[in-house]
Amino acid sequence: MIVKLPPFVPCLASPLEQFSVLPLIPIHFGWVDLSITNSAIYCLLIFVSLRFVWNLILKNGGNVVPSRYQAAAEMIYDFVLSLANEQLGKNAQPYLAIVFTSFLYILAGNLIGLIPFSFATTAQLVVAFALSFSLFIGVTFIGVKKHGLHFLSFFLPSGAPIGLAPLLVVIELISYIFRPISLGVRLFANMTAGHSLLAIIAGFGWSIGTCGSPVAIAAFIPIGVIVVIYGLELAVAFLQAYVFGVLLCIYLKDAIELH
């Protein structure tokens, strides 16, 4: 017996459809497209949400006896502070703001993306690259400003033979250029893979549940799997923000101290 699925079953759609960038307010100036998209709206939503919640929790500098929300905010701050101190040591304080902001923005973007029917901005390659390349340019600028032309010595490890200098410079330069690429791709790939897996299993569970046969009771199995994977994705959301923060601190340390 052949069982036909209803035409509205969502499993027929691609699991990558959830990452589609759609123009909500078309804005065109000749060949320049400045349309406001769902991705731009969610990026703005993350910023506004962070600013509003943080100001609300720490209004007037916070309470002497912290509330539960203030205690949670202070725990996050202390976590990033310890991370920066561990990697940067005495140089951590001037760069704590950018490390903390990057960590908080990526964490919020990852968590908001896990809300059903929302949009995962950190699973967009352009957003991940915008974060990684902008920070990479800033870190490079810090290194050049601090060391001047001596910053170029970063591409030639100390004690290296002069005869190998041309080869080592090329290798170090390529490695340095690929830093923002690997930083962005790591965030993008991990978030895309998790969301796609959830969509695939959810579609599979919906197909089983709506097939109209006794087998439909087996739909509880994919639902259980989704709950487990969703819990793992919550951990991945935090882990990716942590990894991004750690690597940013390492790149800052390299720019400040060179080799």
Image (spheres, helix red, strand yellow):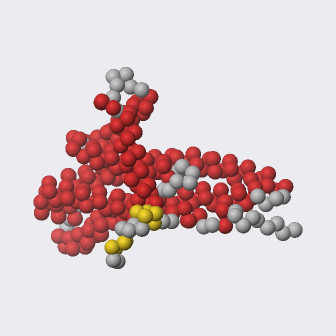
At which x and y percent is residue 250? 30, 52
Say whether residue 49 is visible.
Answer: yes
Asked if 171 appears above or below 228 in the picture, the reply is below
Direction bottom: furthest residue: 31
At which x and y percent is residue 256? 20, 52
Residue at image x 72%, y 51%? 221
Say whether residue 88 is visible.
Answer: no
Toward the viewer: 247 or 114?
Answer: 114
Residue at image x 66%, y 62%? 10
At which x and y percent is residue 231? 57, 45
Q: Residue 184's image quarter? A: bottom left
Q: Quadrant of the N terminus?
A: bottom right
Q: Quadrant of the C terminus?
A: bottom left
Q: Residue 144's image quarter? A: bottom left
Report the number of numbered marks. Answer: 0
Residue at image x 72%, y 67%? 7
Residue at image x 37%, y 63%? 129
In screen coordinates, is 189 left or right of 167? Answer: right
At which x and y percent is residue 44? 39, 53
Toward the viewer: 51 or 114?
Answer: 51
Direction right: furthest residue: 1
In screen coordinates, is 160 left or right of 36? Answer: left
